[in-house]
């Protein structure tokens, strides 16, 4: 697998310019950034969440971890991390743990960490653990046009 067919069709429909970068398989977003030789702040990761009735995707740099309390403040409601089974159900054409931070093509609402707005280039896993998608930040914004932006994560170190 390279990138998910759902993501590939969505990017084609929107006329998004992107490059694919092959790298040694990695199982974490930080490991992927390292394997791809890219800045970890430019590596976007998605975390799927649930409020019990609907799902959404929180997108942040690989160098950050999610703060659910801050997310609650941003959204005005509590969210929990989605289970592996829930994630697999939504991202059916992606390898486990390699979900793209593009919720729009999977019917998910999206919130993007403000720190992502500082990046000129964005990299992310497109559905497997050995292929990175690279694009300009403006194109990434076009992939999640209705995304909310907020501050809900912090650097790991």
Image: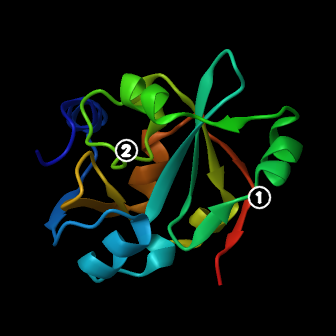
Task: Give the x, y percent position of residue 79.
Answer: 74, 35
Instruction: Identify the image quadrant of the C terminus.
Output: bottom right
Taking the image as shown, residue 131 lies to the left or right of residue 98, namely left
Task: Give the x, y percent position of residue 82.
Answer: 57, 34
Task: Give the x, y percent position of residue 140.
Answer: 43, 52
Distance in Å between CA atoms under marks 2 and 1 = 21 Å
Up-down relation of residue 115 to residue 68 (above or below) = below
Taking the image as shown, residue 13 lies to the left or right of residue 105, namely left
> Disc 2 marks which residue?
99
Question: Depth check: 145 or 30 in front?
Answer: 30
Answer yes or no: is residue 120 visible.
no
Name the residue located 76 percent from the left edge and 58 percent from the top edge. Answer: 151
Please, what secondary structure does the residue beneath circle 2 have?
Answer: loop
Q: Quadrant of residue 3 in the image?
A: top left
Q: Quadrant of residue 148 in the image?
A: top right
- Between circles 2 and 1, the one closer to the viewer is 2
Instruction: Identify the image quadrant of the N terminus.
Output: top left
Number of numbered discs: 2
Label at residue 151: 1
Name the residue located 28 percent from the left edge and 46 percent from the top edge. Answer: 16
Question: Depth check: 113 or 24 in front?
Answer: 24
Q: Earlier in the sequence, mark 2 or mark 1?
A: 2
Please, what secondary structure does the residue beneath circle 1 have?
Answer: loop
Q: Residues within 10 Å of mark 2 (few under 14, many from 20)?
A: many
Colour scheme of the picture: rainbow
Label at residue 106: none
Q: Residues within 10 Å of mark 1 (few under 14, many from 20)?
A: some
Question: Depth check: 36 or 104 in front?
Answer: 36
The furthest residue to the top: 53
Taking the image as shown, residue 155 lies to the left or right of residue 130, namely right
Question: Depth check: 142 or 105 in front?
Answer: 105
Task: Give the x, y percent position of residue 137.
Answer: 45, 61
């Amino acid at each position: 697998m390279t990138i998910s067919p759902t993501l590939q069709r969505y990017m084609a429909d929107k006329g998004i310019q992107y490059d694919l970068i092959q790298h040694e398989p990695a199982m974490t977003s930080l490991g992927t950034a390292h394997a791809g030789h890219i800045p970890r702040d430019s590596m976007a990761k998605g975390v799927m969440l649930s409020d019990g009735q609907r799902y959404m995707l929180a997108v942040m740099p690989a160098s950050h971890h999610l703060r659910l309390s801050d997310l609650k403040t941003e959204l005005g409601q509590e969210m929990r991390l989605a289970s592996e089974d829930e994630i697999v159900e939504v991202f059916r054409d992606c390898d486990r743990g390699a979900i793209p931070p593009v919720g729009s093509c999977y019917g998910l609402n999206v919130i993007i960490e403000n720190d992502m707005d500082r990046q000129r280039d964005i990299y992310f896993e497109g559905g497997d653990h050995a292929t990175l998608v690279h694009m300009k930040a403006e194109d990434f914004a076009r992939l999640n046009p209705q995304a909310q932006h907020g501050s809900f994560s912090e650097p790991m170190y």
